Image (spheres, coloured by chain):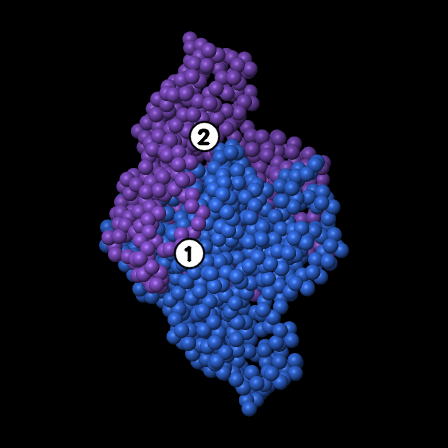
Chain colours: A blue, B purple
Amino acid sequence: MPRSKELAQANLENLYRIFTIPEAPDSTLGRIDQAISDNLAGFLQEHIVALERDMSEIEGDFSDSRVPEEPTFVSDYTAFLKETLVAQSVHTASPSFIGHMTSAIPYFMLPLSRIMIALNQNLVKVETSKAFTPMERQVLAMLHRLVYDREDRFYERFIHDSNHALGAFCSGGTVANITALWTARNRLCAPSGEFRGIAREGLAGALRHLDCSGLAILVSRRGHYSLGKAADLLGIGRDNLIRVETDEHNRIDLRRLREYSRRLADEGILPLALVGIAGTTETGNVDPLEALADFAGELGCHFHVDAAWGGPTLFSRTHRGLLRGIERADSVTLDAHKQLYVPMGAGMVVFKDPAALSAIEHHAAYIIRRGSRDLGSHTLEGSRPGMAMLVHAGLAIIGRKGYELLMDQGIERARRFAAMIEAHPDFELVTAPELNILTYRYNPAWLQAALAEAPQERVSRINALLDQITETVQKVQRAAGRSFVSRTRLAPARYGGDSITVFRAVLANPLTTDAILASVLDEQLFLAGQGETIQLVRKLAALAPPQ
Amino acid sequence: MPRSKELAQANLENLYRIFTIPEAPDSTLGRIDQAISDNLAGFLQEHIVALERDMSEIEGDFSDSRVPEEPTFVSDYTAFLKETLVAQSVHTASPSFIGHMTSAIPYFMLPLSRIMIALNQNLVKVETSKAFTPMERQVLAMLHRLVYDREDRFYERFIHDSNHALGAFCSGGTVANITALWTARNRLCAPSGEFRGIAREGLAGALRHLDCSGLAILVSRRGHYSLGKAADLLGIGRDNLIRVETDEHNRIDLRRLREYSRRLADEGILPLALVGIAGTTETGNVDPLEALADFAGELGCHFHVDAAWGGPTLFSRTHRGLLRGIERADSVTLDAHKQLYVPMGAGMVVFKDPAALSAIEHHAAYIIRRGSRDLGSHTLEGSRPGMAMLVHAGLAIIGRKGYELLMDQGIERARRFAAMIEAHPDFELVTAPELNILTYRYNPAWLQAALAEAPQERVSRINALLDQITETVQKVQRAAGRSFVSRTRLAPARYGGDSITVFRAVLANPLTTDAILASVLDEQLFLAGQGETIQLVRKLAALAPPQ
């Protein structure tokens, strides 16, 4: 990193200057700032280098473990940053990067973010956030209403009632899911009689009080990995996160769910929560939420819906029916940095019962005092930025109709891509899109024919080779930097239980056109005939000769 | 909120435009953006209204629980935002706001934040963060080195070793503390023999395995409230967070600590962690970390240091000795959005043992796969923004010497303010600054004389009345909007165990001058002679007549 010692010394002596006086606007940082303001897409296109450098090489740029002794000029630092960090970051906004859940963000999010950061509020308490507190409560009320659609009077009563909370704002869906299950656990193990509640006595005492040998969380195998973290963190144990098999549409198998529940009852394990998924991370499917709500009622346990991805589908009059039953959930997770198109770091959990969050309420002498309006009394996190402002902006500027259009277009785009894959002789659609996520793989026509007739043992050997092709193509495509799809492993019914590696496409970027989608397939087809995959295709041909 | 339906309709039809084309730069949002770039301090001064509006009135601006049906123009929305949210936010950067831990931020943080948000990386995995992954690991290594100062070879070995981690980046100190205690819990209850570990079997199984009746966390009464949250969340129970009394300098009482530990042993409760504080939130004091390290060794338990506030004092050659012993901690929490002068949302926990975080490691099929470099495999949070970039920038641009100056100046400023208070006949310094935090209260000279001679019963009555004055003055001062100190409750030895309400000043803003500090006292003195406090002073005079 370049240093200009003498001038830096001057900077040191006038340290307070960096807190007040910006550099001249034609400085390196000023120019970048302007370029982003003028044309974000152009900036990203120009400065992010497409071709992937080897990770160990990039690590070389970030290998000094000493804090630099002397100050550095902002422009020198910015030049370093541009060449190393910015150049080697991921173009998450690119319309041909359809592999992850991070999409382009509306242009107004950038200048609004600057306002948010300039104000540097801390939402843990009113004294450091003032109007940001009711603003965040309003955002939570809006999302609560989107999910639960209660009457006006309900919202008038609770929106700003500091003794109640319609939800909690979080840094993301993981903290939202943990908050939901923490609340569920503490409500199940609430104070009663001599028992002062799990929050005070701990889990062991709670189990004794409830006279059970453990608590369990039930979810399908498509459940997000944050649920495993929650089971660990909350002291429940990952073995008690029961991952129920799914049907051919990646939805929880209700028959198996009943079986597991019976087994738990036999073992004296109490179901703490049943979790439904509205948009699984890997395939975008939606669990049968009505049926799950019924079953949670039977079990008498908390019903949580992880709608981190699929929640905003509720904006669409056409598709919101897919989530029917979500309004019966006790809590629902939503991620604003996914389909509300807000920058990274904005999740939420809303609760049907505005008193639910009191189960995790806490206070202190100098902050979040009893009776105060401080939001920090019922959040897992402490100090938090005013990200809710960006959600507020999105909801106001884009509006329900705007989000509806984004949701509808995404689902239509996914369906067109699925049709493209199905029409292509050399690709296999593995999971059709229910929302806007689908999975597929390269599987040449001659091999598809052979697979259909091969005995299971040969099917498995073919799949193992195809897995290697999928993985290689995905990595090489990512490294080439023109386009990106992600990959995961699924066990579709058609292959007798074999887990296979698949490409995963998330069609959330409104700038992704059909032409781009066609070129993603073209590139994959090209890559399947290149380099090491040729050897793999030859091995496949030996197993199942082209007809 | 204003709407222009017809034009908004056009916006709706061209939804993709908001993802690409910024408005003309002379739009409302463009002008604000420019104003912040040109002169942040001026913008905040001009747009944040000083005089506090009643909270219920502000709530009225954020009381619609419906998501607007139609889109809104960005400029209309921004105008609304400016008048409601921005105007009624808190001027956290103001040099006369010395009540909270949020200070002014260096100007370069704003344009760099824009780069960070424009890139919109997700640090949960390399595929959505690339160079941000080694950059964050470098930041963690730098902070690790600041605390532990291991040899070059150690850092060369571990800085980018994906099977190890020098720490975890978090949204804040609360998540950092939880992560530390979660790790400590899982290491204490690690797999052994038939026991598959607490992460899999849960807490009840772990207690059976360890043959103990519970786990406990030991910390002084000045411990941050996040430790209570951690005790609840981790299933340990708040009753098992043992809050040890402090000495007259708000440092943990080692004799009492030994007593509690013996009592725990008698009850069959295992100490999970001993927590030392380097800069208590309320008074800025530092626990005797050497002695705590020794005692944690005796107990054989995890030693965690919460240095969320005081950690950066290590940059100061003059004052780093105050934290002696921190290098013996198993884990240390640091908050970058406090004394590293980074915007809200950046905390860290570093671990002495680079293998420690494997106790909370987790994987999934589509992300954070085993053997990958993905940072998400050992963080509590999932998707996370690239905030580490701003810490990286601060460390590089300000440098060690720059931070040293900031720390030294803060401590000197606090000492000068303490001297000012002590020299003033009508104020009482309650806790002197060890770092840059102090507490005091209005206590007129005649009353101080009376208090010194009064029997305890009268002392308590006087203190109760003084508490009301302190609380009133603090609230009225905040509402007037010229300056701000916070308040808390402490029980200094001098009043026989009485808890009293005190003003709390945090001297971290480099722009706070002695003149400003003098004017804060002047205003408080003025307010103590105004409105309802006059009645309280009269009551005091009746109890302890002026001589």
Q: Residue at x 54, y 22 (%)?
A: B498
Establish if A218 lies above or below A535. above
Q: Residue at x 65, y 33 (%)?
A: B260
Q: Which residue lies furthest to the bottom in this view?
A: A547
The total number of labels drawn is 2
Q: Measuring from the top left, give residue A149's x and y in whole percent.
A: 50, 51
Name the residue type under label 1. Answer: Arg
Q: Mark 1 points at which residue?
A: A400
Q: Which residue is drawn at 31% across and 64% down?
A: A42
Q: Where the N terminus of chain A falls, by quadrant?
A: bottom left
Task: Tell which tag, 2 or 1, sits nearer the viewer.
Answer: 1
Q: Which mark is residue B510?
A: none
Q: Measuring from the top left, give residue B157's x and y in whole percent.
A: 50, 58
Q: Residue at x 55, y 78 (%)?
A: A466
The answer to whether the residue labelled 2 contacts the one labelled 1, judged by CB atoms less than 8 Å apart, is no
Q: Mark 2 points at which residue?
A: B487
Judge the density around disc 1: few (<14), some (14-19), many (≥20) Cα neighbours within 10 Å: many
Residue B487 is at least partly visible in this image: yes
Name the residue type under label 2. Answer: Arg
From the viewer's side, name the closer residue of A143 and B529: A143
Instruction: Identify the subunit bearing mark 1.
Output: A
Q: In this view, does B72 lie to the left or right of B214?
A: left
Instruction: Identify the subunit bearing mark 2.
Output: B
Judge the density around disc 2: few (<14), some (14-19), many (≥20) Cα neighbours within 10 Å: many
- The secondary structure type at the circle numbered 2 is strand
- Rendering quarter of residue A9: top left
Distance of mark 2 from mark 1, alpha carbons?
43 Å
Q: Measuring from the top left, give residue A194's x and y in whole percent.
A: 70, 36
Q: Which residue lies furthest to the right in this view?
A: A266
The lab-note entry on whether marks 2 and 1 share a chain reads: no
Q: Measuring from the top left, give residue B542's x and y in whole percent.
A: 46, 11
Q: Which residue lies furthest to the top in this view?
A: B547
